[in-house]
Image (cartoon, grey):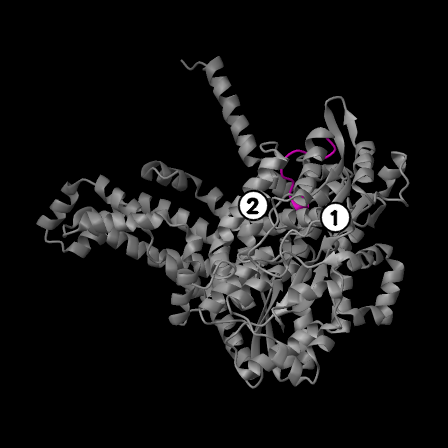
Amino acid sequence: MVTMRRASPAALLGIAAVSAVVLVWSTPLLWMAIAAFRPQNFGGLDMAALWPDFTPTLANFAEALDSADFALLYLNTVVVCLGTLAVQLATVTLSGYAFARLRFPGKEWVFYGFLLQLMLVPPILIVPNLITITRLGLYDSLLGIMAPYFASAFGVFLMRQTFRTIPKDFEEAAIVDGASWWQLVWRVLVPLARPGMVAFGIVSVVSHWNEFLWPLMVISSPDNQTLTIGLASFTRGAESASQWGVIAAGTFLVAAPLLTAFALFQRQFVNSFLFSGVK
Amino acid sequence: MSRLASAALAAALTFAIGSGAASAATEIEMFFPVPVEGQLAKEMKRLIERFNTEHPDIKATPVYTGSYDETNIKTRAAIKAGRPPAAVIMSANFVLEYQINDEIQALDPLVAAGGETADAYMGRFWPALHGNARFAGKIWAVPFHNSTPLLYYNVDHFKEAGLDPSRPPATWAEWVDAAKKLTVRDGGSIKRYGVMIPGNYDYLGWIMTALTMSNGGLYYNPEFGGEVYYDSPSMLGALSLVDDMVHKHKVMPEGVTDGKAVSTAFFAGQASMVLLSTGSLSFIRENMKANYAVAFVPRNLRNAVAIGGASLIMPKGLSEEQKKASWTLINWLTGPEVSGHWSRFTGYFAPNKGAYELPEMKEFIAKNPDAKVALDQLQYAQSWFATYNTVAVRKALEDEVQAVLSGKRKPAEAVKAAQAKADEIMRPYVEQTALKLPN
């Protein structure tokens, strides 16, 4: 017999608490979505209101789209994010495997040396990196934005930890069947480590999608600009007030692809993060 | 994915064709920041397109480089990496450091090649702008757009509070008095503030400069980049005024208010008087619904403000053709006509005095009395603080002022701490210069 399970007061309280947290965390997003459709309004206090009390308008989007070549900006940003990720996945998988499974002298020291990179604040590397990029002839190119990220200390660390959670039995069975080392990596470890790779992929794409300072340093021609620079060129100013509606619409355009991707693959994302322990 | 790839290919092809056709012209890059709100980046691109059409032998590319501070970082990095831009619109007070580091060209030879004396060349710009452009015996920069802080006030609030909007506060005493009358309280909470000032980095330092100068201070040694006067009576007085407005008179909000929040509060009628840049004039004129007017920054001992804004500089390491092309661009951008146009578009005043002789500018000033006030204040303007490592030295003070605004420090301790920090930052330079003595 099926009975309606009544939620206990404690559970209700929990749901209320979670809802409150969700509301607080989503406020900026909600405000952005609402402000993007709000008619330009400088004089009113309702500018900060979350309640849509107006006739929605697309004027802000029209102005934002008119202010920058968004098609090109999207294309450049996608090329940078996916290009970086593709190379990173190869490098972090191989070096993660080396640090997790291979034995070689000084392995620990090399690994800690790698981790040291995580302690560096990126801005101090701007000048040396830019000099290297220029010598390689990559100044003002998308490849120049990507190159410094091809080796990721965080990714190597994550993949090493992921590989170490996989029981050695799988590999030993494969070795008995005559697999070479690269077959081990490609056919045994990589499929089992997919959640870790997805988690790393998300962190990588999101951070490069949002990055501002480094692309600003490398890129000079407007044709090579990424979304963040395009957005900043018409929304940022130090000495004056803001056209909040246009800023919200522009930010909406920049964030929309990532938000959509998250909505579509929410379950996989959450699972990957749970699995890999990345928060 | 294939569509993406073909789009990329198409983009690459058009780019290649485009750059191939123009290869006969001298190619130069100009870095420009967007310091104020509005469609500045777009307007700058339009201007440069016009320049390129009028000068078929030059192909200039405008490169958006973020804020003043980011433009500084990018310019320095590009110079170090061996890819100097041909011209940069640089915050006027950063120019000194480029000269100290020997990274920019002195412009005197180019001036001389044009058959003019340095004095005649500088003579076309307002005198207040000379200090940040011509120093150590040479011309290092050409003023492009400049500003001063200005007191913006809400005329309707003035009438409501029984104040005469045609007589804005001219002294600190009148300013505090007006602020008290304009502040609207509702029990313990404040519904409208009498005064607001921007508390974010860069802006705050500039506003404190204006207040210190209005209090008779110098702020820094204009002749030597290794001295600032933070621990001085004029600065202490200025900072105490700010502290009193927040904590004693309670006419200004506690904590750090960003410049954008200040103008938004002014638009929304939540602040009656604000100190903001003249660079915001056009934006406020277009978007403020209530009646407003502008006035000089109130004085304690004298009327004095520091200039702000940016100048064009030319990095070293350019070819002769690039230098020539860059010089043509710089003079085109700072000529009366373009200068006046940019001034009307942004609100900055035009550095070139000739701009105000043009009929369209005369008409504009007649129609907009607020622009006239900004121009009148210019005769009391002085050079902008510039030292060795300007940004860090500025931040040493700003951090302390922010602590005072938040009620964590008293003004007297704050100025001492700021002075100590600034001295420490400037020590390497001071030891190489003023303290380098004969053995």
What residue is shown at x 68% (from left), y 79% (from top)?
Answer: B53
Is B128 situated above or below B267? below
Residue A234 pos. (x, y %): 64, 57
Residue B64 pos. (x, y %): 59, 63
How packed is label 2: few (under 14 Cα within 10 Å), some, or many (20 or more)?
many
Q: Point out which mark residue B419 bears.
A: 2
Indicate which disc, 1 or 2, sits on the residue closer to the N terminus.
1
Foreground: B349 or A65?
A: B349
What residue is shown at x 30% (from left), y 47% (from top)?
Answer: A115
- Please, what secondary structure does the residue beneath circle 1 have? helix
- Secondary structure of the magenta portion, mostly? loop
Which residue bears the numbered disc 1? B214
Is B413 situated above or below B206? above
What residue is shown at x 58% (from left), y 36% (from top)?
Answer: B413
Magenta segment range? B250-261
Q: Amino acid at mark 1?
A: Ser
- Please, what secondary structure does the residue beneath circle 2 have? helix
